[in-house]
Image (cartoon, rainbow, N blue to C red):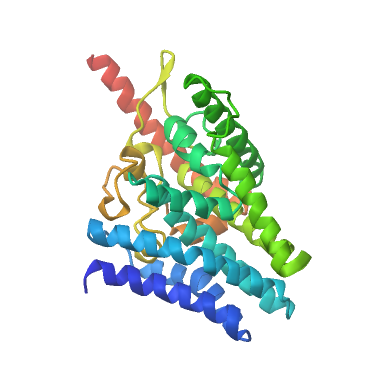
Amino acid sequence: MPPFVYFLLSLGLSIFLLLAGAVADGWWDFASFLWMGWVVAAMDHFLQGETPGPTQRQAKALTVGLALLHFPLLALGVWALAQGGPVLNWLAYFIACGLFFGQIMNSNAHELIHARERFRRALGRWIYVTLLFGHHTSAHPLLHHVHVATPLDPNTARRNESWWRFIFRAGHQSFWKGLAVEKRRQRNAGRHPMNPRNPYWTYVLGGLGCIVLAYATLGLAGVGAYFAVCLMVHSQLLMTDYVLHYGMRRRKIGDKYEPVSPKHSWNTPHIMTNLLTLHAPRHSDHHAHPQRGFEALRLSDEQPMLPYSLPVMVTLALWPAYWRKMMNPRVDALHRGLDSAASEGDIAA
């Protein structure tokens, strides 16, 4: 089958199961959770390797189609959770919503905010706004991509930094540092730092508008469900950053840092996760070519690989002691090789 069909099948099944859980209840509440939380991880264990992407035209159509589905799907998910129900069913569907919007839709929005076309970038921005994470539209390209693998990047996890500490540090620093960058951009353009062109007005007021809409249509139960889903999504988004950049560092050369290289991101070759997250685990190539569409991202032998698939790694990150035992030796081995290569290069020079 053409590569595009595999993306359609895997994403289509994810959307169908999320819809089924919202309207059918019963065992369907567990179906989406089991699919994204367990079945995908199991399939990843057996399916690894390089998978071709769709054509550029197909990739653009896929990202736009997913974006347009995001808004009714989010509304439906919040509505379903606001209705309540048996505790286990509610929890299963809540986690399913968090995984769907925090992994699949986050990956799609991430793809869109890097797009060249204004319309696609706007779609990505509004996905993040409706998830109450609009500032990521500014902080990701202006902070993370510029300062990745340095202390200046709030979304690069330090060696030995636990996930629990990282989420609080990165969560608020990315907002305020992103705001500082946007204010500086306005000043450089000769405008007041908080003039109406500052996109933070859209992020904040757009988010407030979504909260008001949830209250107006579903009452306090709707606001509670909406906040719960958004917090779960935030944790998933930050968890992905934590895993894909844990312990990475760029050497400082004089008053600058060395250029970003494939060695400054972790990657995974697992097929199912790559299909559902639009090749997000091909992270080294993305940082090397931020405007390259997901369909063109590639894996190579020089890119550091995580020992397990992304769903497994984000779960293991919840246990800091085990995480450090597993990842610190890999981080140290990677940096020993990089430092040794850099020293040899200095001697040769």
Q: Which of 301 and 255 is in front in this view?
A: 255
Give the image quarter of residue 11. bottom left
Is residue 305 positioned above or below 196 on the image?
below
Q: Does 44 sit left or right of 97 as displayed?
A: left
Q: Quadrant of the N terminus?
A: bottom left
Q: Quadrant of the C terminus?
A: top left
**Residue found at x 47% / y 78%:** 16
Using the image, determine if residue 196 lies above or below residue 59: above
Camera sees residue 270: no
Residue drawn at x 37%, y 46% as measured from the top left? 118
Which residue is at a point 27% across and 67% down the rendered structure image?
Answer: 4
Instruction: Say whether residue 112 is left or right of residue 221.
Output: left
Q: Which of the pair 180/37 is nearer the observer?
A: 180
Residue 149, given in percent of the width and then of the height, sits at: 46, 33
Q: Where is residue 93 in the image (x, y as percent from the top left)?
A: 62, 73
- Which of the pair 154/137 is nearer the observer? 137
